[in-house]
Amino acid sequence: MNAQTLAQRAYAQSSATTRTDRALEYDLIARVTHRIKAAAEAGPAAYPKLVEALYDNRRLWTALAVDVADSDNGLPADLRSRIFFLSEFVQAHTGKVLARKARLAPLLEVNAAILRGLNGRRHKK
């Protein structure tokens, strides 16, 4: 192992431990959103990947809803209720998308809006 490899590993470990909760939330939402887009753009053959990405998006939104429902959550009550409402929308709309009764775009728009909101606060706690 050379010095460059050691330095890269040390930096990677350090940067991972200094990330804020908001930065982690941003990255999770960005990753699942990217997976949804990529599967949708890949066409019908990628439908199983789309279903998997939508399932993960639902799990993510369930976790967000549980978090904002916690009385110890520090976000303002209005913002918490809006996030909870969005979670309910994502759950219901995903079911419609999977039943091929609704378009995928609203789910991507919701995630994009959350990413924009988190982007301004990624490095704050």
Image (spheres, helix red, strand yellow):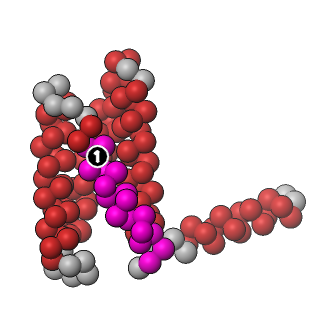
- Kindly indicate the quadrant of the structure image that contains residue 26: bottom left
Question: In this picture, is 48 found above or below 79?
Answer: above
Q: Position of residue 96 (x, y in %)?
A: 13, 33
The crowding category of the residue bearing disc 1, from other C-alpha atoms within 10 Å (few below 14, some 14 to 19, many at least 20), is few
Work out which quarter of the rendered image holds the N terminus and state it.
bottom right
Q: Position of residue 123 (x, y in %)?
A: 48, 74
Q: Name the residue: 30% across, 43% down.
A: 108
Q: Name the residue: 33% across, 36% down.
A: 52
Q: Name the residue: 42% across, 64% down.
A: 119
At label 1, the amino acid type is Glu
Q: Position of residue 93 (x, y in %)?
A: 15, 40
Instruction: Point out the stretch of residues depicted in magenta.
Output: 107-124
Between 23 and 60, the one nearer to me in the picture: 23
Instruction: Verify whether residue 100 appears in magenta.
Output: no
Instruction: Verify whether residue 123 appears in magenta.
Output: yes
Q: Name the residue: 17% across, 25% down.
A: 100
Left or right position of 42 against 98:
right
Q: Position of residue 53 (x, y in %)?
A: 34, 39
- Kindly indicate the quadrant of the structure image that contains residue 72: bottom left
Question: In this picture, is 58 found above or below 68?
Answer: above
Q: Secondary structure at mark 1?
A: helix
* Prevailing secondary structure of the magenta residues: helix
Outermost residue toward the right in this view: 2
Outermost residue toward the top in this view: 45
- The residue labelled by disc 1 is 109
Q: Is residue 99 visible?
A: no
Left or right position of 51 against 13:
left
Work out which quarter of the rendered image holds the C terminus and state it.
bottom left
- Kindly indicate the quadrant of the structure image that contains residue 23: bottom left
Q: Is residue 35 visible?
A: yes
Question: In this picture, is 15 found above or below 89?
Answer: below
Number of numbered tags placed on the structure image: 1
